[in-house]
Image (cartoon, rainbow, N blue to C red):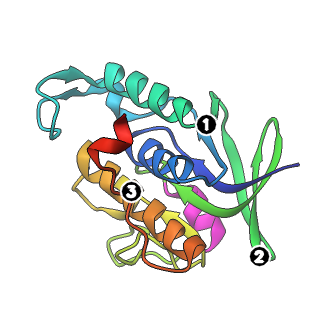
């Protein structure tokens, strides 16, 4: 069984954004991506900073970016179960089990894993989360279409992933954490 700080289930904008933030800030991060993202059906005209880009090209670029920050990305790997294991989670795949301190669910409108984990749902049948995207299961987060009845936009999902990651980083650092780079960081 491999051990990691953060396990991300999903490879669309929410999952890749979360993985980027956690890995960039020195948390070991593993991501499972079945490539079922809706982005393959999209063309972006409404994503801030992108004038026009094919959704598949966007995902390819996001994957390259998270890979550069050291995310252990498992392309084409289906997560079959996520269960609490004391102070951590066991994430099961056909390739074996992985243990993580935190789990971020980013599986689009597929809420099955959240339901199987015992996460609470709202009256609208979406996963109940707080403003940080944490579910009613401590240290388990849900993002994107899982937590929204209709607002299924890539930029919103990416923000949800970032919110989950920043809350995890805040917990790990013991103080409010802000991922804010300055021009000197790029040099």
Residue 152 is situated, as x and y percent measured from the top left of the image, at 26, 49
Question: What residue sits right under mark 3 in the picture?
Answer: 162
| Local crowd size for mark 3, using a 10 Å CA cut-off: few (<14), some (14–19), many (≥20) | many
| Local crowd size for mark 1, using a 10 Å CA cut-off: few (<14), some (14–19), many (≥20) | some
Q: Which mark is residue 123?
A: none
| Local crowd size for mark 2, using a 10 Å CA cut-off: few (<14), some (14–19), many (≥20) | few
Residue 89 is situated, as x and y percent measured from the top left of the image, at 74, 64
Question: What residue sits right under mark 2 in the picture?
Answer: 87
Q: Which mark is residue 70?
A: 1
Q: Residue at (56%, 72%) from the top-left corner?
A: 173
Residue 156 vs 51, above or below: the answer is below
3D distance between C-alphas at marks 3 and 1: 17 Å
| Rendered-image quadrant of the C terminus | top left
Q: Disc 3 or 1, which lies upstream in sequence?
A: 1
Q: Disc 3 or 2, which lies upstream in sequence?
A: 2
Question: Dot 1 lies on which element?
Answer: loop
The residue closer to the viewer here, 123 or 71, is 71
Residue contact between numbered discs 3 and 2, judged by CB atoms under 8 Å: no
Range drawn in magenta: 111-119
3D distance between C-alphas at marks 1 and 2: 24 Å
Q: Disc 1 or 2, which lies upstream in sequence?
A: 1
Q: Residue at (71%, 47%) from the top-left corner?
A: 80
């Amino acid at each position: 069984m491999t051990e990691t700080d953060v396990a991300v289930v999903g490879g669309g904008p929410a999952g890749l954004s979360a993985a980027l933030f956690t890995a960039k800030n020195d948390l070991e991060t593993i991501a499972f991506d079945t490539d079922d993202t809706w982005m393959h059906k999209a063309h972006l005209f409404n994503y801030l900073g992108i004038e026009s880009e094919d959704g598949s090209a966007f995902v390819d670029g996001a994957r390259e970016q998270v890979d550069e920050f050291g995310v252990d990305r498992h392309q084409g790997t289906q997560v079959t179960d996520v269960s609490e294991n004391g102070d951590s989670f066991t994430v099961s795949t056909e390739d074996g089990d992985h243990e993580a301190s935190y789990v971020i669910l980013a599986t689009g409108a597929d809420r099955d894993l959240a339901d199987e984990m015992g996460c609470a749902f709202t009256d609208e049948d979406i996963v109940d989360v707080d403003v940080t995207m944490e579910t009613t299961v401590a240290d388990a987060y849900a993002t994107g279409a899982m937590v929204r009845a209709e607002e299924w936009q890539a930029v919103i999902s990416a923000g949800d992933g970032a919110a989950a990651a920043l809350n995890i980083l805040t917990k790990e650092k013991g103080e409010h954490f802000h991922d804010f780079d300055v021009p000197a960081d790029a040099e």
